[in-house]
Amino acid sequence: MKLLSWNVNGYRAAWKKGFKEWLAKENPDIVCLQETKAWEEQLTKEQREPLGYHSAFSKPERKGYSGVGTFSKKPPARIEFGYDIPRFDSEGRVLLTDHGSFLLANIYFPNGKKNQERLKYKLDFYDETLAYFSRLRDAGRELVIVGDYNTAHKPIDLARPKENEKISGFLPEERAWLDQWVEAGFVDIFREFETGPDHYTWWDMRTRARDRNIGWRIDYFFVSENMKDRVRAAWILPDVMGSDHCPLGIEIDE
């Protein structure tokens, strides 16, 4: 089973740049999108069901902001939105789909760069995420938690770690949460297959950083420890254009 994830920085914009053609070429079983910036009712039927995929979209309170969407060839057994906490759920950042043998969480984590208030919001969101999925892990569920985490974990995960030590996205407290996440039994599965540098998923468009591969790896597939042995491959697709992020993927045994 092939799973892909991509922060598209606007689903309708990505559609105009060839999303359907890309989807047909990659032919994933499931694809998770972040930063969709669209309510379901703003989309055409073809955009909601491209190539016959089933879809679910979160609905942030603000139009044109945040949002996640999950497409799957087979309809999930169950769909849930958010953590049942209005403070977080109002931004439409969490979509859970149950695929029988595993539970998939598609998450667009907050960005903390704007100010201290948003950084606190991001860290609080992180803490709730850890608590929520730890409960599911303790219940024995096999979990895939994918999305734009908005933090590079290790110095190897960004091109210029020294210059960014005081920037949200690489702050000690953000990285410490990712340490906690790993210690709690969630595996950064890409690093199980690729331990080398220069693998990134986001580049600053304003500075044309992508041309020089001056990037950050802030998009991840994490899986619960009990899911790890089912993963056969993990990769990043840095040559796919259309967003300031690129897609990433994993292959798992069904």
Image: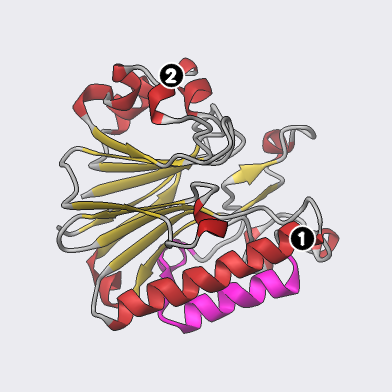
Q: Please rate how many residues cluster around mark 1, counting C-alpha atoms within 10 Å: few if below 14, some from 14 to 19, many from 20.
A: few
Q: Residue 117 carries which label?
A: 1
Q: Please rate how many residues cluster around mark 2, counting C-alpha atoms within 10 Å: few if below 14, some from 14 to 19, many from 20.
A: few
| Residue 96 shown left or right of residue 82 in the figure | left
Considering the numbered disc 2 on the image, is that residue within a helix, a strand or a loop?
A: loop
Q: Position of residue 26 (x, y in %)?
A: 31, 33
Residue 84 visible in the picture: yes
Q: How is the image coloured?
A: secondary structure
State the CA–CA distance, disc 1 to disc 2.
37 Å
Name the magenta segment's main secondary structure: helix
Marks 1 and 2: CB-CB under 8 Å? no
Residue at the extreme front: 86
Q: Where is residue 244 in the image (x, y as percent from the top left)?
A: 62, 35
Q: What residue type is labelled 1?
A: Glu
**Span of residues in magenta:** 170-194
Q: What residue type is labelled 2?
A: Gly
| Residue 41 shown left or right of residue 182 in the figure | left
Residue 193 magenta: yes
Above or below: residue 231 compared with residue 186: above
Residue at point 48%, 22% (across, down): 12
Residue 148 visible in the picture: no
Residue at point 41%, 45% (across, down): 5
Above or below: residue 55 compared with residue 181: above
Residue corresponding to mark 2: 18
Q: Position of residue 164 (x, y in %)?
A: 80, 59
Which tag is nearer the camera, tag 1 or tag 2?
Answer: 1
Residue 92 magenta: no
